[in-house]
Amino acid sequence: MARSRTPDPARTPGRPPAGDTDRRGSALDAALACYVRRGIAATSLRDIATEAGVTPALLHYYFRDAAGLRDAVIAERLMPVFDEVRETLLGMADASLRTVLVAFVDLLCALVARHPWMPALWIREVVSEGGDLRDLLVTRLAPEISAFMAARFAQEQQAGRLNPALDPRLLMVSLVGLTLFPAAGTPIWRQLFASDDLGIDDIRLHALALLDRGLELPA
Amino acid sequence: MARSRTPDPARTPGRPPAGDTDRRGSALDAALACYVRRGIAATSLRDIATEAGVTPALLHYYFRDAAGLRDAVIAERLMPVFDEVRETLLGMADASLRTVLVAFVDLLCALVARHPWMPALWIREVVSEGGDLRDLLVTRLAPEISAFMAARFAQEQQAGRLNPALDPRLLMVSLVGLTLFPAAGTPIWRQLFASDDLGIDDIRLHALALLDRGLELPA
Amino acid sequence: MARSRTPDPARTPGRPPAGDTDRRGSALDAALACYVRRGIAATSLRDIATEAGVTPALLHYYFRDAAGLRDAVIAERLMPVFDEVRETLLGMADASLRTVLVAFVDLLCALVARHPWMPALWIREVVSEGGDLRDLLVTRLAPEISAFMAARFAQEQQAGRLNPALDPRLLMVSLVGLTLFPAAGTPIWRQLFASDDLGIDDIRLHALALLDRGLELPA
Amino acid sequence: MARSRTPDPARTPGRPPAGDTDRRGSALDAALACYVRRGIAATSLRDIATEAGVTPALLHYYFRDAAGLRDAVIAERLMPVFDEVRETLLGMADASLRTVLVAFVDLLCALVARHPWMPALWIREVVSEGGDLRDLLVTRLAPEISAFMAARFAQEQQAGRLNPALDPRLLMVSLVGLTLFPAAGTPIWRQLFASDDLGIDDIRLHALALLDRGLELPA
DNA sequence: TATGAATGAGTCTTCATTCAT
DNA sequence: CATGAATGAAGACTCATTCAT
């Protein structure tokens, strides 16, 4: 039974013809918005259909079922973004550690600037035990990056060029905890500090400052 | 005729009489477990009833509806924990900044050690736009703490006793990003680095080291 | 997870308390009527709910799902009838072949008289390749009976007391083909021959006559 | 503007031009296969489309709707077979009763040999109360045959040339019950008696033997 | 001639909730 | 104090059918 479900499989990978109304793409965007707002598990197909202005039946026509839609969102909206991070990072094997770290922070922040929905979705669906993005992270995205980064950290540490009290494994985690995590909570910090201008660039500078020299507290 | 729905409203705040099997408390625990596992929004009353080994009707008898149950979990399981953090922190107004910071990190880590479910629930439900914990954070827990901490940071910074490139508003966010966030992802880092022993104490030491002196990268 | 779905399992095997309205039993009867009318596979839960005058949700409450309802109908409406046939027949091991055969025909015809819906359901759902009754026949009801009967036939044939041209395996099939099959089609034959009085007793006498002496055609 | 929906109505009765891939004919065959497998009422248009390897829309293009397809299957696949039976039988008005009976049995068995799907479909869809084939039988096929046969039986009986205890109306029913009915259940009897070789010819010989002289039980 | 797009109605099923007991 | 019975609303998904191309 040929899986010829998707109306025009040949069109799937890239963006649609453009110019014309692209209902499939709109559906993906609507799904993404719902996922960000309520979480993947709590989003119903009907929510997405309403958001996209189409009937639930159409979503079934395009994506077969709820899991198919979710997979399509991951494949066509999330993976391209993640792949970009991986490519950029792995291409920097020869740069100095400082360069790599700054590039990593810059990369994540630039990513947030372009895709404001990313951090919230990422933080939420990755830490969730049954989260679908967690598998994605653990099996496809992170292994290469984390191995590369952790190895590099350990090596620099042994050479005495990195704070010896740090845990090489947790350093990469820290980079995320100082960028994506604050970015995900931006609406909260804004409200908490009554600072409507608090943005990803503040996060970036703050993270770099903290990483670079720590708190600089007097002994 | 006011329908006094909760069996014994007077008993609610504290623990039940004890001695008897405490079905209400078990229900709260079951709900908490489900919230952690699947997220608050994606947890059905039926899930909780099954987990607790009671009928859905009993949950209605105790908590009126799903929102009532959720509120009870927040009030009786989450708030006590958060209040403890707030009390401890606010009681340290006179201590040195280093002492306060170390105490904050220690406090969060001790909390994780005692309530391993906390970080995942917290991280997930706080970033969710409509999340109920987010309201809780923004309206009840954080205002005092964040105001206290940010003011203290700014004051120390002006006195030249804190890295001037840091953002006082984001520093408290960073403390969470370096403790609760890594803690929430522990299963992932363990799998990623094949380190079954990676625990909250590693997170604590790493965070303190990073905060204290940063990366110590050579110029 | 204890399958404590059925409201009152203890009541299940026998008929309900009687006197009170037995909605579970009514649902089984309604399901049976629909199965007979349209076939098991083509009967929707909604059909049954409408026929029984209840909501589809109630059927789920009682029987969990469509398959559960079907199984309940089989177990509580069909099996008792079939078991009766098996018991009666297997209890006649010592009787003469003629006695056994006449008893078999009489038994089936009496059964039809008491449960007019039986033949149609039986004929239809047994020949259907994926039919659920077919499994029932092949695995639970027929093996004993058919083995017993075929063995008896073969033994009588060897002793020269049965038409040697007959196939012992098919003889029992013939008994059904001369009783249940004509009974299932009764409405048709009545219409075809404009005989409103054509009934199960005509079928019985005709079958016995044919079995006994055949057509008695002159050579 | 009369929408001439069937592509080439003139082609309908006979086989298509041949030489070209006959998608209409394949659809009919696919439908027939599905009908046999699941029953007419339980077969969806989509099932048939999948089986035929075409789109549901094409079936609508050819047959207008599900009923139209079913009617086409009846008209172009079933009726020719049934007509053949009728023609053959009605052409034997002058033959001896024995000849007619043997011919009838032979005819049905030959038919089964050529169209193994026939008996199952026939038995199932004819006894079903709302079955579409039942109308067919009652209104188009059987009236002539059954009238002819029953009259003949009655006449022979009055002349003392047929077992007087038989019911002339049911005799023709018996012929079907001893041929098509056993044939429909062949897979079952095979499994039940572990006889993979049990076939239509065994059925034919057994039926003839039983009809001819009955069981030949000793008094 | 044939099909991809689209949908309203219908399917089974789960859910939160009510209520009598 | 607790639950079994019951249901309306909503869930995912399937279906036959229409229509523009």
Image: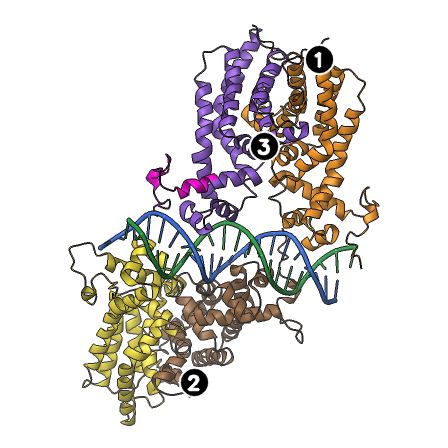
Chain colours: A purple, B orange, C brown, D yellow, E blue, F green
From the viewer's side, name the closer residue of A36 and C121: A36
Residue C166 position (above or below residue B16): below
x 50%, y 12%: residue: A99
Whether residue D45 is visible here, answered yes or no, is yes
- Tell me how far mark 2 sits from mark 3, CA to CA: 72 Å
- Asked if the stretch drawn in magenta spans residue A12, the answer is yes
Span of residues in magenta = A1-29
Task: Measuring from the top left, give residue A96's x and y in whole percent.
Answer: 49, 10
The residue nearer to you, when weighing B89 against D217, is B89
Residue that mark 1 sits on? B158
Label number found at residue A127: 3
Disc 2 marks which amino acid? Gly
Secondary element at tag 3? helix
> The residue marked by circle 1 belongs to what chain?
B
Q: Gap in Å between the C-alphas at discs 2 and 1? A: 106 Å
Q: Residue D73: percent from the left, percent from the top? A: 28, 66
Closest to the observer, B175 or D77: B175
In the image: residue D45, left or right of residue B33: left
